[in-house]
């Protein structure tokens, strides 16, 4: 009779856990005479990541001379499941790509700025649907480009609605550069950054004086909007963006290398990877250090929201793991889980059908400074990825993503421009998801 009660109780507990979405703790093994309790035992799923497969994929990219150097780090279910480094960080000086190699992350700066701004959102400093001009008055009198008149001069009209803070978070604000339109010429003439001499506040003011390329909320177009996010961080916090990141993100997370400035005299400067341009014939030309490191080699007044940070694999992985942990890593709570969920949920308005090149990223929408996968890969030409993942990349072909469904965070570093013409990202993603029949592109 006692054995029967035990079996019923164990089975009921298992079923109750499933019904209410809980993760039942593995039950202690029942006595041998009670086989009915066996369904209560939870068997952990096998790891998805197969290190040898990723090694083979990345090593082949170097051996085939598609890239000069690459490194990658993957965490799965709270543990490091993969690290690999192949090829050279500096071909001319024969320095190998290594775990402590420092790279320029370019647009992978953007999600970090987004997290900084959303910390202030949690403090009640603003609401997403408030007009941007409420906090940055220069955006109160913007005009929208509406074609050209009979004399070839740009026609301007008033925006049909104000730019909302939400718009600058998802690239629907009207900002953007069309090189063929008069707006492109006006944008260049504005000299936004002033050779890095302008502060973030000045950049915002100069950008607001350039006509919008489209009516707010009608298109998705990648832009300088994250510089405006940085201006808001400074406005709300009273700190420069670099200081805010240092105090409220980097120090709590233990990101000891990530920063805007890496001077020639800094002890870790030799770890900075060279930058290479891939030519049309597949060869690589090293950019001069003066050109490649111009921004990071001095402490400029301009601290961008859109680019500018350098980092290491382990540093950026701490940021990615914090997001995977619902805003928390170790004892450091950076964001609330509901804020991370908000950032990683598709916020693209249904009426927005013009999405520029965003569809090239796959079956994705856009949240707050992240692309968000909304459907599995539709064919073998796409990069593999799991529904619900959120990610972004950088101009030098760097990449990171967070996959809550599989409990995975991944970071990939290289230093190659123009952006990933050799399908490195697809190669890496396909290797990571090879054993996932839903996420694998096939």
Image: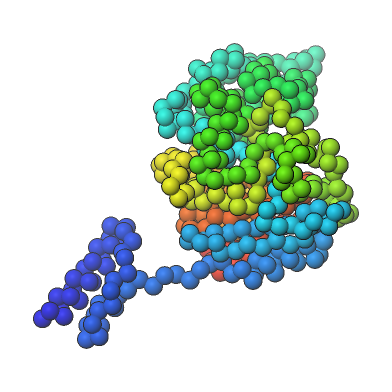
Q: Residue at x 61, y 68 (%)?
A: 51
For the image, the number of numbered tags is 0
126 sits to left or right of 84: left
The answer to which image quadrant residue 186 occupies is top right
Q: Is residue 185 above or below residue 285?
A: above
The colour style of the image is rainbow
Q: Is residue 331 above or below residue 115?
A: below
Quadrant in which the N terminus appears: bottom left
Name of the residue lying farthest toward the bottom: 33
Q: Residue at x 42, y 33 (%)?
A: 122
Q: Residue at x 50, y 47 (%)?
A: 323
Q: Residue at x 67, y 22 (%)?
A: 199
402 sits to left or right of 412: left
Q: Is residue 167 above or below residue 35?
A: above
The answer to which image quadrant residue 201 occupies is top right
Give residue 410's position: percent from left, percent from top: 58, 55
107 or 75, which is in the foreground? 75
Give residue 254's position: percent from left, percent from top: 54, 46
Give residue 280's position: percent from left, percent from top: 87, 51
Give residue 180's position: percent from left, percent from top: 78, 29
237 or 8, which is in the foreground? 237
209 sits to left or right of 27: right
Quadrant in which the C terminus appears: bottom right
Residue 63 can be seen, yes or no: yes
Residue 377 can be seen, yes or no: no
């Amino acid at each position: 009779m006692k054995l029967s009660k035990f079996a019923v109780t164990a089975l009921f507990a298992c079923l109750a856990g499933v019904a209410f979405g809980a993760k039942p703790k593995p039950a202690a093994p029942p006595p041998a005479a009670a086989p009915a309790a066996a369904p209560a035992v939870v068997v952990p799923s096998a790891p998805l990541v197969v290190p040898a497969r990723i090694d083979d994929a990345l090593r082949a990219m170097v051996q085939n001379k598609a890239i000069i150097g690459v490194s990658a780090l993957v965490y799965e279910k709270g543990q490091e499941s993969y690290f690999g480094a192949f090829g050279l960080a500096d071909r001319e000086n024969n320095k190998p790509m290594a775990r402590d190699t420092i790279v320029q992350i370019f647009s992978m700066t953007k999600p970090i700025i987004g997290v900084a701004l959303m910390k202030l959102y949690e403090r009640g400093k603003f609401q997403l649907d408030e007009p941007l001009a409420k906090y940055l008055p220069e955006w109160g009198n913007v005009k929208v480009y509406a074609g050209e008149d009979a004399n070839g001069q740009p026609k301007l009209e008033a925006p049909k609605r104000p730019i909302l803070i939400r718009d600058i978070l998802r690239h629907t604000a009207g900002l953007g550069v069309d090189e063929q339109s008069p707006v492109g010429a006006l944008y260049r003439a504005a000299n936004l950054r002033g050779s890095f001499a302008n502060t973030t506040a000045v950049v915002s003011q100069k950008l607001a004086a350039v006509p919008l390329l489209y009516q707010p909320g009608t298109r998705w177009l990648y832009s300088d909007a994250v510089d405006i996010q940085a201006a808001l961080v400074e406005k709300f916090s009273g700190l420069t963006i670099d200081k805010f990141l240092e105090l409220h993100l980097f120090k709590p997370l233990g990101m000891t290398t990530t920063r805007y400035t890496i001077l020639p005299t800094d002890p870790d400067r030799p770890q900075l990877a060279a930058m290479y341009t891939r030519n049309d014939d597949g060869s690589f030309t090293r950019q001069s250090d003066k050109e490649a490191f111009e921004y990071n080699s001095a402490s400029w007044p301009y601290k961008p929201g859109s680019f500018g940070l350098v980092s290491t694999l382990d540093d950026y992985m701490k940021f990615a793991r914090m997001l995977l942990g619902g805003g928390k890593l170790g004892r450091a709570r950076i964001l609330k889980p509901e804020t991370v969920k908000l950032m990683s949920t598709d916020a693209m308005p249904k009426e927005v059908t013009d999405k520029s090149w965003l569809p090239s990223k796959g079956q994705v929408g856009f949240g707050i400074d992240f692309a968000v996968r909304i459907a599995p890969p539709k064919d073998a030409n796409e990069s593999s990825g799991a529904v619900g993942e959120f990610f972004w990349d950088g101009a030098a072909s760097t990449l990171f993503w967070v996959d809550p469904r599989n409990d995975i965070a991944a970071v990939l570093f290289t230093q190659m421009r123009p952006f990933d013409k050799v399908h490195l990202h697809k190669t890496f993603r396909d290797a990571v998801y090879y054993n996932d029949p839903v996420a694998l592109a096939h």
